[in-house]
């Protein structure tokens, strides 16, 4: 009987057991050296039980909001502890969707449509899943993971710039169609959403705006690359109850920390600063304090917005 260290599983089995697509597995191995699979006599990758266990832990950590570049080097004990923290905080995948394998199949098909430069099929495919899961489930289970995979595969040179741009544009169009931003009334609580100056990745901000809009908030979506003083001025003028900041890859951590602190200090005292996105975890320790809430998924954002609305 093979031991946990002996490699005998093909990549298809690994994808099924971990929920990671073969594309993501290859990218993680090549860029981050998360595992070192052996090769079969025919040259195919084969994995051990220990490899599968590690990959599954890494997947759970990334689904909780931690970037693969930050967790790839963690040993088993630290990785297990991180996953326990993530899942005990409520940032894990909702149980109703976890483990079904269906979201991953949808993501794999979306990647195939992007590779084929087929925007019509990609849009119809994503729209069907938006209708099936609802806007929050769609963003958490399909749209956001799909865009992460697109970014990783593009960085690995396995998607062209055109394919990456098409995938992003179609996904954001579907998000906007699924939850139009022109919702809420003057009587609805207001949320201002933007990214920090120098942060040009606006997909997460748009998804947060769609989530808030679907929950009845009056959304003021400012888009990407905003100076902190402009965000504060808008929030003050609009009497915002929440200011939402999405960050993916803060190029200069010190500048991002200073900007978040300036926003937290400058917005109205009754307002709360929400911070989310793939880059939020590395800023949390430096910025955490009263009046600042970190969120790691759209489901968590929706729950926190519900609490803020009830004040």
Image: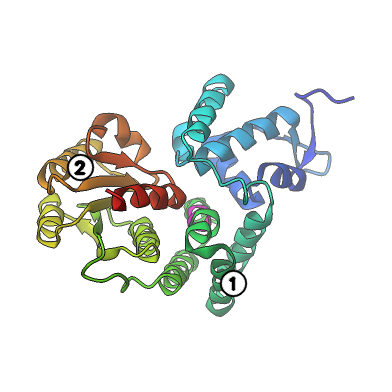
Q: Position of residue 43 (x, y in %)?
A: 77, 43
Q: Position of residue 56 (x, y in %)?
A: 63, 37
Furthest residue in direction bottom, as rendered: 120
Q: Is residue 107 left or right of residue 136?
A: right
Label 1 Cα crowd, 10 Å radius (few <14 / some 14-19 / many 20+): few
Q: Quadrant of residue 70?
A: top left
Furthest residue in direction right, as rendered: 1
Q: Position of residue 274 (x, y in %)?
A: 29, 46
Q: Nearer the viewer, residue 1 or 299?
A: 299
Q: CA distance from mark 1 to mark 2?
A: 37 Å
Q: Nearer the viewer, residue 216 or 231?
A: 216
- Identify the residue at horizontal 21%, vertical 70% (top origin): 186
Question: Which of the two discs, 1 and 2, labels the residue nearer the N terminus?
Answer: 1
Picture mark count: 2
In the rendered image, residue 147 lying in the magenta stretch gets the answer yes
Q: Is residue 189 visible?
A: yes
- Identify the residue at horizontal 64%, vertical 54% (top origin): 104
Name the element at disc 1: helix
* Stretch in magenta: 144-150
The disc label shown at residue 67, or none: none
Q: Nearer the viewer, residue 33 or 291?
A: 291
Using the image, determine if residue 234 lies above or below residue 290: below
Using the image, determine if residue 239 lies above or below residue 121: above
Q: Nearer the viewer, residue 205 or 166?
A: 205
State the residue position of label 1. Answer: 128
- Identify the residue at horizontal 47%, vertical 52% (top origin): 155
State the residue position of label 2. Answer: 260
Quick check: marks 1 and 2 in contact, CB under 8 Å? Answer: no
């Amino acid at each position: 009987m093979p031991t946990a260290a002996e490699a005998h599983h093909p990549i298809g089995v690994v994808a099924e057991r971990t929920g990671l697509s073969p594309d993501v597995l290859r990218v993680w191995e090549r860029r981050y050296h998360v595992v070192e699979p052996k090769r079969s006599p025919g040259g195919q990758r084969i994995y051990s039980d220990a490899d599968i266990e590690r990959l599954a832990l890494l997947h759970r950590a990334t689904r909780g909001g931690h970037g693969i570049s930050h967790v790839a080097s963690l040993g088993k004990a630290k990785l297990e502890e991180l996953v326990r923290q993530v899942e005990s905080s409520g940032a894990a995948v909702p149980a109703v969707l976890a483990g079904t394998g269906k979201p991953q199949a949808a993501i794999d098909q979306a990647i195939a449509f992007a590779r084929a430069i087929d925007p019509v099929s990609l849009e119809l495919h994503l729209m069907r899943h938006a209708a099936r899961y609802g806007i929050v489930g769609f963003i958490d289970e399909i749209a956001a993971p799909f865009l992460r995979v697109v970014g990783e595969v593009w960085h690995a040179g396995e998607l062209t710039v055109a394919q990456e741009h098409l995938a992003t544009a179609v996904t954001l169009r579907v998000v906007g169609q699924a939850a139009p931003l022109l919702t809420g009334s003057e009587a609805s609580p207001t949320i201002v959403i933007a990214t920090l100056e120098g942060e040009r990745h606006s997909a997460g901000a748009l998804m947060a705006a769609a989530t808030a809009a679907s929950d009845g908030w009056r959304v003021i979506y400012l888009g990407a690359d905003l100076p902190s003083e402009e965000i504060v001025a808008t929030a003050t003028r609009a009497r915002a109850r929440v200011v939402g900041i999405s960050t993916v890859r803060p190029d200069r951590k010190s500048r991002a920390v200073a900007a978040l602190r300036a926003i937290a200090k400058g917005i109205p005292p009754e307002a709360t600063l929400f911070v989310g996105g793939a880059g939020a975890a590395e800023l949390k320790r430096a910025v955490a304090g009263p009046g600042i809430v970190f969120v790691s998924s759209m489901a968590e954002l929706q729950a926190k917005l519900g609490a803020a609305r009830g004040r």
